[in-house]
Amino acid sequence: MKPVLEVDELIQDFGGLRALNEVCLTVHEKEIVALIGPNGAGKTTFFNCITGIYKPTSGDMFLTVEGTRHRLNGRKTYEITALGMARTFQNIRLFSQMTVLENVMVGCHCHTHAGILSALLRDRRTVREEQDTIDRSYELLKTVGLERHWEDTACNLPYGAQRRLEIARAMATNPHMLLLDEPAAGMNPHETRELKELILRLRDEHNLSVLLIEHDMSMVMSLSDRIYVMEYGSPIASGTPEEIRHNPDVIKAYLGESRDA
Amino acid sequence: MKRIFKALLVAVWFMVLCSPIMGLHVNPDNSISFLWERLVALGIGIFFASLVWDWYFSRVQTSAVHMHMPKGVTATLGLFKQKKTRGACLTVLLLFLVAIPFLPVLGSIYQISILISALIYVMLALGLNIVVGLAGQLVLGYAAFYAIGAYTYALLTTYFGFGFWICLPIGGIMTILFGLALGFPVLRLRGDYLAIVTLGFGEIVRLILLNWVGVTGGSHGISNIPKPGLFGMELSLQSNTIYLYYLCLAAVIVTIITISRLKNSRVGLALQALREDEIASEAMGINLTRVKLMAFALSSAWAGFAGVFFAAKTSFVNPASFTFMESAMMLSMVVLGGMGSITGVTLGALILILVPEYLRAFADYRMLLFGATMVLMMIFRPQGLITGERRKYHITALEGREEQA
């Protein structure tokens, strides 16, 4: 299996606080990897580093797309998205006053080209590109099961649907690597099960690698191929779900040290 | 009982507040007389107004009344929204606008020049709408770009004898350059910070124009700016005004088409995404820097065009025409009309220019009425006159199904 995302000894300092301490992580092709850890362990900070929102203090990040290895350090967020790494947000960040369809259309931005001039002239190519964008966005809404809501305003969707819309919007950027930040937060067991199926289906249909942060352990254990565990910004364990389940360090981080141990 | 007491309190408060303005009168011999009857009349008026106000709000709170636009307005808007009637409506409107110079009352030079300035403001408001309404960046110094456009024409024509048609694009280019120059340093700012910086920019431009006496003539301004010519023909004042009216009308139509196309394009969508959430839109692959600068440049270009038209219309410019008040007016047009809505902003500009103009009959109360309207508007319809203007999308997959059904 070829690696898609490689992160090597990533360090992120905020003033005197070391939010990430030499984090190493690899995600291979078509692999689903989970990143878990107690609150404040630095999981979302890690996402923000690899998507270029934060500038890491040191360390290397690479994204391999179609055989080419791109160094991510110093790239802008939108460049990283255009390379093929898309993300969703922990606290939903939809374009809430725009329609569901428009939200997904914005995701198509980096693979369409019409500029101001073609917007004003509306030549045949622009019109066709626009119609393609609309149709493609609608197809993506179908895959996440939101096609009936395409005309609704995004903020009127129920919570679970908003999370799925975020995934559809991220998929619109045509990613090779999808980062999901707590996709199941606030979902009921039924919705979580559907989400799991959706992630598996997206991986198979789009040859996607997935890195997800999640607190729902049953979902993490059943969905992921490998798991990384973080605590206080440092990686403390990694391995298959089975290994993680029995790792004493992980149990300690989550449950605290038992007194008679 | 409680309500009556409250209304009484409000009335007394108003009487105290207004007593220096309304209750005192300085006689020619420097003695002061009190005008009690005026104050009492004011008090009684405010008492009843406050009672009605209170009663109304308690009804709104118990949701006995729903806020609606007057039926006539909704019906007219409905006509516009339907595709079949829309074309007819627009044609009638356009024919009316074209015919105005030949109508008996409206066709006087005075009326037409009011309309010209209204049209210029429509251009300005629509231009500002790009950056405020679509991209959601609060810009308070828009009059500066208007001034730059106007002075570009004024200076080029007095020093180099350039004509209107050459100056129109040059004015646009100049303001684009200034827009970019302002845009680069303020890229990171948003909301109130951006408002303050742009406010400062507006004042800087005005003060430079005021104090660079050698070039701009300071507060005396520049006069004798030529009106646009028609293939080198000399026109009388009457026909020249009409000619300028048509030019402005054409410019406004071009503006409306351009901006509605922009709004519905890929770039327009990116701008709206930027307004909603900057971080998310960057994570969706939008180059914030580029899109923001584009918005600034386009928006300022329109102010430049409007400025050239303004200079041509008045044939005289001085810094007093480009104060902060102008910027505030333009912003009010956008907010009153409904941010981002093209019809709304156009209406807002027309209302804010034409209503004070035709209220001249009530000369003394003109600004009072104007202010009251604005306050009421913001209480009852803070989202602006027209909102929810949405583009209709057609999905190929769905259309096929409908045809089969």
Image (tube, rainbow, N blue to C red):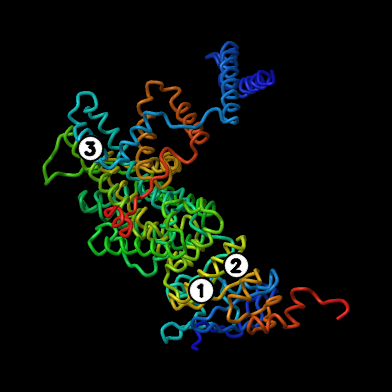
From the viewer's side, name the closer residue of B19 and B215.
Answer: B19
Q: Earlier in the sequence, mark 2 or mark 1?
A: 2
Q: Quadrant of residue A129?
A: bottom left
From the viewer's side, name the closer residue of B227 and A212.
Answer: A212
Q: Position of residue A258 (x, y in %)?
A: 84, 76
Q: Is residue B42 above or below residue B74?
A: above
Q: Amino acid at mark 2?
A: Glu
Badge 1: residue crowd in 10 Å (few <14, some 14–19, many ≥20): some
From the viewer's side, name the closer residue of B74 and B125.
Answer: B74
Mark toward the viewer: 2 or 1: 1
Helix, strand or loop at mark 1:
helix
Q: Position of residue A54 (x, y in %)?
A: 57, 72
Indicate left or right for A148 with B317 as reference: right
Instruction: Tell me the chain of label 2.
Output: A
Badge 3: residue crowd in 10 Å (few <14, some 14–19, many ≥20): few
Residue most extreme to the bottom: A1
Q: Which residue was labeled with disc 2?
A: A182
